Image (cartoon, rainbow, N blue to C red):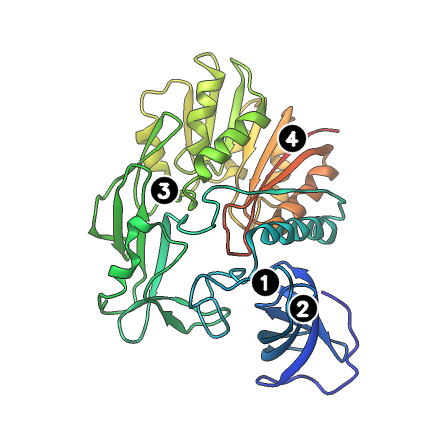
Amino acid sequence: MDAAVPTGERLVVGQQVTVDIERIAHGGHCVARFEGQVVFVRYGIPGERALVEITSVNSKMARGDAIEILTPSEHRISAPCEYARPGGCGGCDFQHIDLDYQRVLKAQVIVEQFSRMGGIDVQCEVLAVEPSDGLHWRTRMDFAVGDTGRIGFFGARSNDVIEINDCVIADSAMNVAALSQRRWNGDDRIAVASTSTGQVSVTRAGRSISGPTQLVEKVDGFTYQISPQSFWQAHSKAPATLIAEVISKLELQAGEVVCDLYGGVGLFTAAMAAQVGANGKVHLIEADRRAIGDAQKIFKGAKNVEIHPGTVEFRLPKISDPDVILLDPPRTGAGEEVITVMTRTHPRAIVYVSCDPASLARDAKLLLASGYRMDYLIGYDLFPQTQHVECVARFIPA
């Protein structure tokens, strides 16, 4: 948190103030100051002067929305979605910023988080991924239900549902415009999934409403049959992009032993098993029962794949001397216990896939303290128009 000594009266909700927006921060907002008070501003861009309406205040800082841009940035564009505005949908953070600069800002967030959370100086580039316009990429959507029974999304830092007519980042195959015309009784969330094989599934509270009850995804010659509730990368190009990156950085050899931690349904397991061959072994560890069930079906009969239901910290110590480890934890990261268990196995490389630079930075600090060094870091823009970014890092013995 930026240190600041307020020089004026404490800001209050609803107050409008003019501020100079300083820099991007982790979380989809920018940092500004008003009379010494830190203000986290949504819908602004570093370098802009803006009129900001305060939306919340606590003892350390305030939050607000840029409601009028007095000095616009050269990177400001018109948002392609009518709901990407103050008081609108909270799903997208950066639709008012051109895509190239979105990636610049995300790279700055990665660098800042490594410095702040890990005390590590890094350089990082965030690479573009098709589609080039950053629209209609999302194949997994989770909709709330508004007061009138129409689907929508929660507003930023709010429990209010903003009902929508369409969503410009959703895969067109979902036909969100048609779903938005339906009336849904109750407040159960509506989940929609589209697949690389042309399927569309709609579920509610875990029950199928339309479409197949088992989804078929195909990536680089591998086929995955999964339940709609199992985790799958949301960006249509993410599975192939991440598999290529991970395989490149693992540098697997025939006969090696690999651990796929938080392996889910086995997105990476299939490609790694092909790399290590019949004399190698891939150990997939996953705690989610539904994902484990899917993985057991996908890899039934695969003699070089072993599925381990349970937590990483419990299962990993039972595996002898893995050559390499792939780590793809949830957004909260792996944490000290898992890092300790991992490094005790002394793998020659740990490749870490992360959807949150803050937790990656915290875990990187632990890995460095455990005798490893980071020799590679890259970002992928797998969540365009939003604050989120995917990173791949590699750690090797120091």
Count of numbered marks: 4
Label drawn at residue 76: 1
User: What's the residue at 28%, 69% (across, down)?
Assistant: 150
The residue most toward the front is 74
- Residue 187 visible somewhere in the drawing: yes
Q: Name the residue under label 3.
A: 289
Label drawn at residue 344: 4
- Residue 345 visible somewhere in the drawing: no
Question: For the residue marked with disc 2, what is the amino acid?
Answer: Glu
Residue 22's quadrant in the figure? bottom right
Vertical placement of residue 324 versus 83, above or below? above
Disc nearest the viewer among 4 and 1:
1
Label drawn at residue 48: 2
Question: For the residue marked with disc 1, what is the amino acid?
Answer: Arg
User: Could you tell me how far apart the alpha carbons at marks 4 and 1 are, in whole angstroms?
Assistant: 49 Å
Mark 4 or mark 3: which comes first in sequence? 3
Vertical placement of residue 147 versus 240, above or below? below
The residue most toward the bottom is 9
Mark 2 or mark 4: which comes first in sequence? 2
Vertical placement of residue 88 versus 212, above or below? below
User: Could you tell me how far apart the alpha carbons at marks 2 and 1 are, in whole angstroms?
Assistant: 10 Å
User: Could you tell me how far apart the alpha carbons at marks 2 and 3 are, in whole angstroms?
Assistant: 48 Å
Mark 2 or mark 3: which comes first in sequence? 2
- Please say if the residues under marks 2 and 3 sit with CB atoms less than 8 Å apart: no
User: Could you tell me how far apart the alpha carbons at marks 4 and 3 are, in whole angstroms?
Assistant: 27 Å
Is residue 224 shown left or right of residue 178? right
Disc nearest the viewer among 2 and 4:
2
User: What's the residue at 73%, 38% (across, down)?
Assistant: 368
Question: For the residue marked with disc 3, what is the amino acid?
Answer: Arg
